[in-house]
Image (cartoon, rainbow, N blue to C red):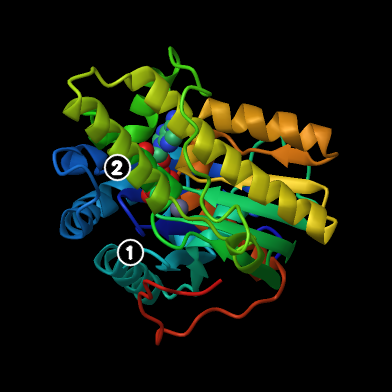
Amino acid sequence: MSEPLVLGIETSCDETGIGIVRGRTLLSNTIASSMDEHARYGGVIPEVAARAHLEALQPSIEAALAEAQVQLDDLDAIAVTSGPGLAGALMVGVGAAKGLAVSLGKPLYAVNHLVGHIAADIVTPDSDPLEYPTIALLVSGGHTSLLHVRDLTTDVELLGETMDDAAGEAFDKVARLLSLPYPGGPEIDRAAADGDPKAIRFPRGLSKAPDMEKHRYDFSFSGLKTAVARWVERCEASGEQVPVADVAASFREAVVDVLVTKALAACADLGVPRLLLGGGVIANKRLRDVAIERAAAAGVTVRIPPLSLCTDNGAMIAALAAELISSGRRPSTLAFGADSTLPV
Ligand code: KG4
Ligand code: ZN
């Protein structure tokens, strides 16, 4: 099957993503987010996310089929994220995918969410083919991972990941410290526009010896978050106004610096002149600008799919399954379940 028609289901966090691809061609990518429902809690509430997936799945599938102008019967396969992610949220997608596959008599592919993020590149309209090897930096509210991709379907290695908070989570928590609303990323970005990124030198996690030797490709944002909290507390204790713009700009600079430094260290160490970015935090223009600028200086080319394919979506899941099918991979048996810590 050279150009399989695949429907992908993504429910690992708060986005219900349904995507349809034909081989490497993107036909539809519908995303329903329960972000607004989590806003008043300042973070994603797993039970709320799971229930929202349950409600959004059927209309999202119908919308994706209509947009792609295909019928369920036309599909060659169903694909679903089986992990990593929030257990309850994953379970909703996995259950729906199994139900669809069994009732339609179609093959089912369980795929890894992180590898899916890399596959987003493949269905990016008008893009050149993804070249191997490449380093991938995936940053969202749920993960911060650095991967060495030698082949999307057979050889993806996790080089490092966050030891505590994900980068997006750090943005969300720091926004809260600064009394900015959720989600914090865009809010910090806005506040940072008027600030001086050099005003405060916040710590870069796991960047100094001996941590750097042991955790060269790992990330840690909890120390940074605590440093911001201390700063805010000190200002408040002395009756000064918190310089929100400077704190936001300095915090953002610390996150961007450590993400780009470690990604480019991986490129240099492994002799890989290509870097792929993915995940919702890529919406951050400062991150994109610094990555592009420092990568150019290091002779590394940067690829960034459009934001609708960077945030969690079903098209990347369908795209990965289409690649697996084209490479001869057999479908999953129904024995798999949601695995919140599924390794790459
Ligand atoms: O991939 P995504 O849409 O969803 C999941 O994490 O599942 O990423 C959302 C995360 C949130 O933590 C949000 O604060 C962050 O991405 N984010 C940003 C920006 N826009 C969204 N972080 C930094 N700068 C932004 N402009
Ligand atoms: Zn993701």
Q: Residue at x 70, y 39 (%)?
A: 303
**Disc 1 target residue:** 93
> Does residue 42 sit above or below 134 in this rendering?
above
Residue 32 horizontal/vertical position (percent)? 31, 42
Please tell me in which quadrant of the rendered image residue 174 appears.
Answer: top left
From the viewer's perspective, is 157 left or right of 306? right
Q: Say what secondary structure mark 2 lies in.
A: helix
From the viewer's perspective, is 149 left or right of 253? right
Considering every residue shown, the one lying at the far front of the view is 238
> Does residue 71 sit above or below 296 in this rendering?
below
Asked if residue 282 shows in the view, the reply is no
Q: Quadrant of the N terminus?
A: bottom right
> Does residue 116 sit above or below 121 in this rendering?
below
**Disc 2 target residue:** 173
Residue 227 horizontal/vertical position (percent)? 37, 42
Q: Nearer the viewer, residue 339 or 40?
A: 40
Please tell me in which quadrant of the rendered image residue 145 appears.
Answer: bottom right
Asked if residue 74 shows in the view, the reply is yes
Residue 158 horizontal/vertical position (percent)? 61, 67
- Estimate how packed mark 1 is, as few (under 14), some (14 to 19) or many (20 or more) residues with alpha carbons within 10 Å: many
Residue 173 horizontal/vertical position (percent)? 29, 42
Report the Cα–Cα distance between label 1 and label 2: 28 Å
Q: Number of numbered discs present?
A: 2
From the viewer's perspective, is 35 left or right of 199? left
| Ligand 1 image position (quadrant) | top left
